[in-house]
Image (cartoon, coloured by chain):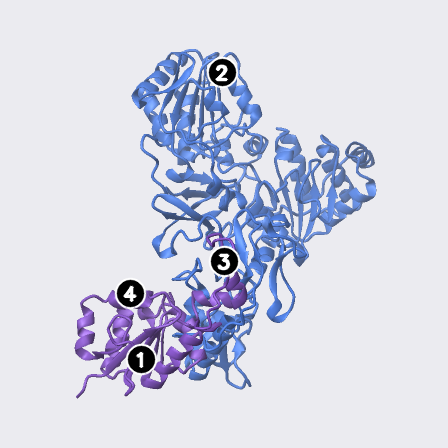
Chain colours: A purple, B blue
Amino acid sequence: MEKPKIASDWMCGCAGCHMSLLDMDERILQVAALADLRATPITDLKHPDASGVDVGVLEGGINNSASEEVALRMRARAKILVALGDCAVFGGVPAMRNFCGVEAALQRAYVEAESNEPGSQIPNDPELATMTKTRAIHEVVPVDYNVPGCPPDADVIFYVLAELAQGRKPELKDELLHWH
Amino acid sequence: MVQITINGKQIEAPEGTTVLAAAKMAGIEIPTLCAHKELTPYGGCRLCIVEVQGFRVPIASCTLPVSPNMVINTETEALKKSRKFILSMLFSERNHFCPFCQVSGGDCELQNAAYHEEMTHWPMQPGWNGYPVDSSHPYFILDNNRCILCRRCVRACGEMAGNFTLAVAERGAASIIVADTNVPLGESTCIKCGSCVQVCPTGALIDRTSAYQGHDDAMTEIKSVCAGCSVGCGIKLIVRDNRIVRIEGDWEAATNHGSLCEHGRYHPMTESRTRLTAPLMKKNGQLLPVSWDEALGAVADKLKPLASDPQNGIAAIASTRLPVEVLATFRDLFAGSLKAQMATSTEEGMTTAATAALAEKTGTFEGRLDVLKTADTVLCIGANVARSHMVAGFLIKRALPKGMKLINIDPAESQLDELADIALKNAPGSDLALIEGLKAIILKENLGRTPLAIPNSEKVIAEAVQSSGIPLEKLTRAARLLAHAISPVILYGKGITAKRDEFLIQSLQALAILVGAVDKERLGFLSVKGEANSLAAAQLGLDAQFALHDQQAVFAALGDDTVSKSLASRLAQAPYLIVQASYESALTANADVILPVSTWAEQEGHFISLDGRIQKAEKALSAPDGIRDNAEVLGEIAMRMNMPVKTDWQKAIRERQSSVVLS
């Protein structure tokens, strides 16, 4: 039987969940033995196979038109979609800007913040993605498994990937369930 | 007893029990958030819903009393789904993002409830509305964004502290917790007891000193006794790396059931005095560090020859914040071996001497603080317990809205005045005339419970009105209120005891008997005493007024206490001053020898509460290097003088008749 294909990508997160994934150390070889690791931010392939993958893992929330595209593409190509980490599951720290709105957040970051040069402006290159409210993935596309944590422990990630790679349904509870 | 069935299990529960409590008795846990064992059930969060056969919808078990043959289920699939939905709604209301919350990771009851229901996400996202944050309070921060409106804080403020500062303003989703009429907490009527913070299930009320200092599972919890005052509240010291992170009221403690006041919870956390770390001796007018050997040797050499001069020898004074073991050793060393004419405590018996003197004549006559819990009328006289013994004050303040009547007699400013049904501000020095007047009025109106003869009652009443300056009409109202009470209590304090007049206390006791505060079943008569070991000091006879009569050396065992200005100035006149203390002070600056000792949390020892409970305070911290234990230092001095002291403190405190039963 062909090994199940796993792909991952990141959106509005800090890469910490992928760092935590690497924290599983040599156990990543076990995952590699069980599954075919395809496009991820830490491998050379940049997009999940157009022909589809079995498991798609997304880190980060959805905060602009670019991350929306990433989420839609992964959802379209993955049989099972995993939201990895608090930003993917809840919106996380980036979602705090929802309390003030995108405009106020940009104004603060690019104009008002003490570290800006005088006369700094909000970037307005038409090539840039359009900012939106920060959303949890399940607000945009259906999610099969939410794996919370900031970041989720390497043990949790290993458990989820190993279960999915072997065709089982991971159950997050007790010691495996932590929101941060 | 009522027969009910929970989850197929037949159980019996006393009538009036809630379903939640009945389930707990049967070992069935129902998830809760707003429920708290020391607070009145409120039914606000709905997490404790259960299914009851015959009921149309699930119902909150915390406010549902059991009724005969009730059939209850707590764990059906439908209930589990409902609980998840209830939690989803709570999470969607406000900012409950966990990663940057101080209680996340084990200390949050909301998060733990979600884990219990195996929630991996929020089905409904939050509404992104900001709520006010109030950081105006010196000890804690109120963040309405983390609030689930369980009203535990509101209930604790009213039901535990009896202060009714916290309330809910606005309606529905806009509801917020406010102080008074929505003023900043720091400018409100808050008495800073911190009960609200202790009961908050989320990160809405966080403590400034302990926030972000680590989760509770990284802390050591040590149960002990507060050394703040004579109430003797049970406390929990939350310790990490030999540092107190936080102090909480012990829910299991019989005295305070979790309540604490500002003195107990927060004052030890804001200690700012400079610690003494090495023995010091005055050499050429300067205090210089010396070895323990040199310091103790100097003390022994100074004191020993003075023992043969009981007239002008040694005066010794010890803090009533010291454990009874230390006080007993101190007494045996100075009053015993060294025959010091003056051996007393820093309180100088101001809150105990007259009471103790009366007890020696009449035997035990004071009751327990608990008696306040069943009182319908309280007379406080010269006892501003809302300030001096706050947790005792809570017992009164929390009962006032339930109908307890309060009469406050105090010539001095008192926080109880505005709470009292009748506040009598008598002229200073008129207490005895006033008490006699009250008795005379009660007898004249034939309201007394026991026969009592007062000759010339009209004259006594006129005298009371004249010397107290209180109109007869007001005095009569007070007398009637007290006489009509079914279970009155008379609480007296320093305003009375500082007169050192046992006849005054005897007069007050007669009033207590007359109105039925004291009878065969009840002892509704007691004094609040002073500091943590006031009563212990009194039992050991350390209750004289401190005065120097040409004594050649003074030994002051202060521990971590501060002394009043008046006492400090009297002590400063000593020709040779030895101070045993934890911190630098004006007194140590004048000392000839300074012996640095452990603080309250660095030593174990017993304290005797105002109502005679002997309680053990535990050692929670290790003292810094070079610091010695209070008792050890006294023992060492005794050894060096060849006068070893072997004190049985349990026996020593019982050598003198006590005003309350010691137990």
SS of the residue at dot 3? loop
Q: Amino acid at mark 1?
A: Gly
Mark closer to the chain start, 4 or 3: 4
Q: Disc 1 designates what residue? A: A56
Separation of marks 2 and 3 at Cα, in angstroms: 71 Å
Please state which amino acid type lies under the numbered disc 4.
Met
Residue at x 36%, y 24% (from the top left corner): B279
Q: In this rendered view, identify the residue nearer to me: B638 or A33.
A: A33
Location of mark 2 (residue): B574
Please, which chain is the residue tagged with disc 2 on? B
Q: Are marks 4 and 3 on the same chain?
A: yes
Instruction: Pick the residue in front: B427 or B448.
Output: B427
Q: Residues within 10 Å of mark 1 (few under 14, many from 20)?
A: many
| Cβ–Cβ under 8 Å for marks 1 and 2 | no
Which badge, 1 or 3, comes first in the chain's sequence? 1
Q: Which residue is mark 4?
A: A19
Q: CA distance from mark 4 to mark 3?
A: 33 Å
**Whether residue A142 can be seen here:** yes
Residue carrying label 3: A120
Disc number lying in front (1 or 2): 1
**Place of residue B278 in the rendered image (x, y in percent of width and height, measured from the top left):** 35, 26
The answer to which image quadrant residue B459 occupies is top right
In the image: residue A27, left or right of residue B302: left
- Whether callout 1 and callout 3 share a subunit is answered yes
